[in-house]
Image: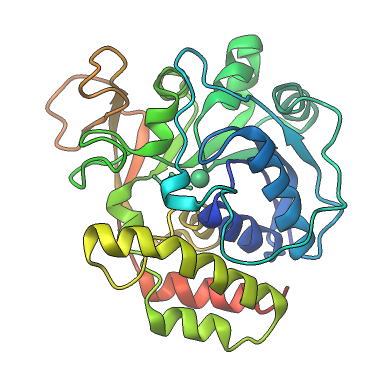
Amino acid sequence: MTRQKIIIDTDPGQDDAVAILLALASPELDVLGITVVAGNVPLNWTLKNALKVCELAGKPDTRVYAGASRPMLRPLVTAEHVHGNTGLNGPELPEPTLQAQPQHAVDFLIDEIQRQPAGSVTLCTLGALTNIALALQRAPEIAPRIQQIVMMGGGFSEGGNITPAAEFNIYVDPHAAHIVFSSGIPLVVMPLDVTHQVLTTRKRLDAIAALGTPVAKATVEMLEFFERFDEEKYGSDGGPLHDPCVIAYLLQPGLFKGRHCNVAIEIHSELTMGMTVVDWWGVTDRQNNATVMREVDADGFFSLLTARLETL
Ligand code: BDR
Ligand code: CA
């Protein structure tokens, strides 16, 4: 089996944690490294959380790199109100013994993309795009070597979740998002329109709990903590499992349906800062730069996730 080489850029976050578990559980994927960025909580927490999740998965060989502690131009905005003060509230996970690599995440991204065969590496971005934009700024020659970026970010008809117009990951570093969306790298986007359909209902969490493993227990504890915010906000049964959609797409792209179109990032207006302006109907002459997903087979997604978690 040829394994798809990926680098996961992330700000864990319970849903990031489940995405990492899904990737580490999947033999089709070769996780070259995990690069960490500030976002849901400050970098010291997101880094520690990434290390904890690799240990929980029983994959202590995973290389984890600390990246940007703040966005390119704007002050850091965090989301403790969603994820808790540690970013990973819910389970009691031991302090990690695994250490971060000494290299900075941005240097790792540049070196690794240059080291691997051109067109062989997919970037999976689950947080603000700061690390990726800094790498592209410093070494623009890596852009054509990247196979694709599959990202969780943005919202279209669903609107925003951190402001009425903006989704959190894009809002945290809109200038970085602007660089990435202008880079010419093939982009696949999982916006809120998709992720809000992937809900952690009781039945789905019970199916994970029934696996009876430490990973399953910790996953359910994370998601029970995480879902309370969105359940209260939207009145939904369960919370949206945003970031694992990125990994699920690599494993089973047929779970998702979308359209290739233009996406531009708002970086001027304070009112709509970080909005993903999606030209779904092709009403501009702006060049298509992203495949934006809008539909998902949520039951298929949870079958895949549950089956893979069972292997950890
Ligand atoms: C995104 O923001 C973060 O809180 C989640 O981890 C996800 O990446 C959803 O808007
Ligand atoms: Ca995230």
Colouring of the image = rainbow
Q: Would you place residue 287 above or below residue 7 in this image?
A: above
Q: Nearer the viewer, residue 167 or 227?
A: 227
Instruction: Determine the residue positioned at 71% across, 77% down.
Output: 214
Instruction: Determine the residue positioned at 43% across, 24% down.
Output: 177
Is the N terminus in the top left, top right, bottom left or bottom right quadrant?
bottom right
Is the C terminus in the top left, top right, bottom left or bottom right quadrant?
bottom right
Total tally of numbered discs in the picture: 0
Q: Would you place residue 171 above or below residue 12 in this image?
A: above
Judged left or right of residue 233, residue 255 is right
Q: Would you place residue 277 above or below residue 10 in this image?
A: above
Position of residue 26 measured from the top left corner of the image (x, y, whole percent):
67, 64
Instruction: Determine the residue positioned at 38% across, 76% down.
Output: 299
Position of residue 95 measured from the top left corner of the image (x, y, whole percent):
79, 55
Judged left or right of residue 62, residue 210 is left
Is residue 71 visible in this depiction of the protein? yes
Q: Nearer the viewer, residue 119 or 224?
A: 224
